[in-house]
Amino acid sequence: MITSLRWADVDLGAVRANCARIIAHLTDGSHLLAVVKADGYGHGAVKVARAALDGGATGLAVATLEEAHALGSLVPAEQVLVMGGLTIDQARSASAGGWCIAVSSRELAAALRETEEVVPVHLKIDTGMGRFGCSPAEAPGLARFIGDSSRLRLAGTWTHFASADSDDAMTRAQFERFIEAMATFEVDPGRRHACNSVAAFRHPEFGLDAVRCGIAIYGCEWPGMRPALALRSVVTHLKTVAAGATVGYGATWKAPDKRRVATVGIGYADGVHRARSNRGHVLVRGRRAPLIGAVSMDAVTLDVTDVPGALVGDVATLIGPDGDEQITAEQVAEWSNTISYEVLTSIGPRVERRYSE
């Protein structure tokens, strides 16, 4: 019995299997930090984190202090890395949690040093991403500043690749800058990590002590992985329209002849991007039905003329399998002029998450 108009089926077994596959791909000695920020890329952070740990991950990574706190006592606090940029005013809260804190500046390191706790930090070096991170030239001095403090401990050193999916030369150059910078440290750099998902796949030799994988553990952007999420809704209305009839805001779709149109109870408030208007397909009864008209806040419309027997109450699959057909998050991203990351993290809170093993 259907109890909700919109839901996401989350396969925790797929998350476990994907983590194990990543680890098998890595060089010996490289560990997996499972990235579960943004509520586990829309899958549910705590449940995904448990599955990732069961699959062999030895640590978790998030973007904010709030996300770290939400993980509770799932793992010892020091096995959680808070990667996002923090302000000086957050230093006390950051230190109190016991998590590893990303540090990019002497100012934040100094603020953390003034707290009452001994804070494990991961020093970030900007080798070409251009966001957070100290320069390679500044890194040895900042590492020494951290190492000389009784209130700070250099638990790790890291960088982030800007174009691992498209520019091997840049990725290799960034990696070399990273290694060269750490070679000048007068203190132990701690756990060294540079690779995100695509870098871990394309350059396992850059695995160092750990890799930080997010999108791959959810089954995207890595060949052969099992997608962990299916997004579904329900046909709520059916009608037959005559040639020339229009559908949706702006009347952007006009029936070329007599057509059967289904309305489905999910829209851009739930993560179906408005850019998908008149683009791509949704699965109904194992058939691909074109999405027609503008995406509304709470509904989309489909041309189900070629779906025999379509009825109100039929399940409509926007991401995932139905019969012999499947729609991937990567396909949806192409139709939405975006990336799979945004497709998954845009799935809204009124979409019920249903978990299976």
Image (cartoon, helix red, strand yellow):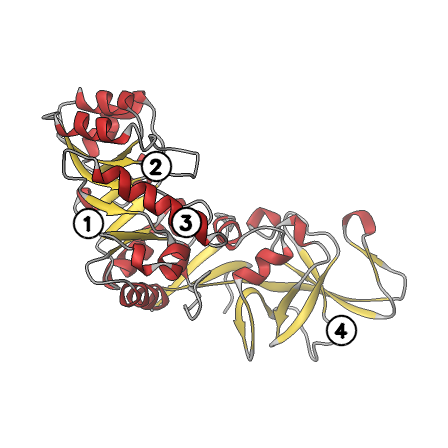
Label 2 or label 4, whichever comes before in sequence order: 2
Give the image location of residue 234, x and y in percent: 59, 64
Residue that numbered label 4 is attached to: 305
Residue that numbered label 2 is attached to: 64
Lateral position of residue 205 relative to residue 316, left or right: left
Vertical placement of residue 256 versus 67, above or below:
below
In the picture, which quadrant includes the C terminus? bottom left
Bin the neighbour count of mark 2 within 10 Å (Cα to Cα): few under 14, some 14-19, many 20 and up: some
Which is closer to the viewer, label 2 or label 3? Answer: 3
Which residue is found at the position 90% from the left and 61% from the top? Answer: 244
| Alpha carbons under labels 3 and 4: distance apart | 48 Å
Of residues 285 and 169, which is closer to you in this image? 169
Q: Secondary structure at mark 4?
A: loop
The disc placed on residue 171 is 3
Give the image location of residue 50, x and y in percent: 27, 57
Bin the neighbour count of mark 1 within 10 Å (Cα to Cα): few under 14, some 14-19, many 20 and up: some
Q: Amino acid at mark 1?
A: Val
Query: Which residue ends up furthest to the left in the rendered image?
Result: 150
Q: Amino acid at mark 2?
A: Thr
| Alpha carbons under labels 2 and 1: distance apart | 17 Å
| Alpha carbons under labels 2 and 4: distance apart | 47 Å
Which is closer to the viewer, label 2 or label 4? Answer: 2
Which residue is found at the position 22% from the left and 26% from the top? Answer: 141
Label 3 or label 1, whichever comes before in sequence order: 1
Q: Secondary structure at mark 2?
A: loop
Residue that numbered label 1 is attached to: 75
Of residues 205 and 211, which is closer to you in this image? 205
Of residues 95 and 138, which is closer to you in this image? 138
Which residue is found at the position 12% from the left and 26% from the top? Answer: 148
Bin the neighbour count of mark 4 within 10 Å (Cα to Cα): few under 14, some 14-19, many 20 and up: some
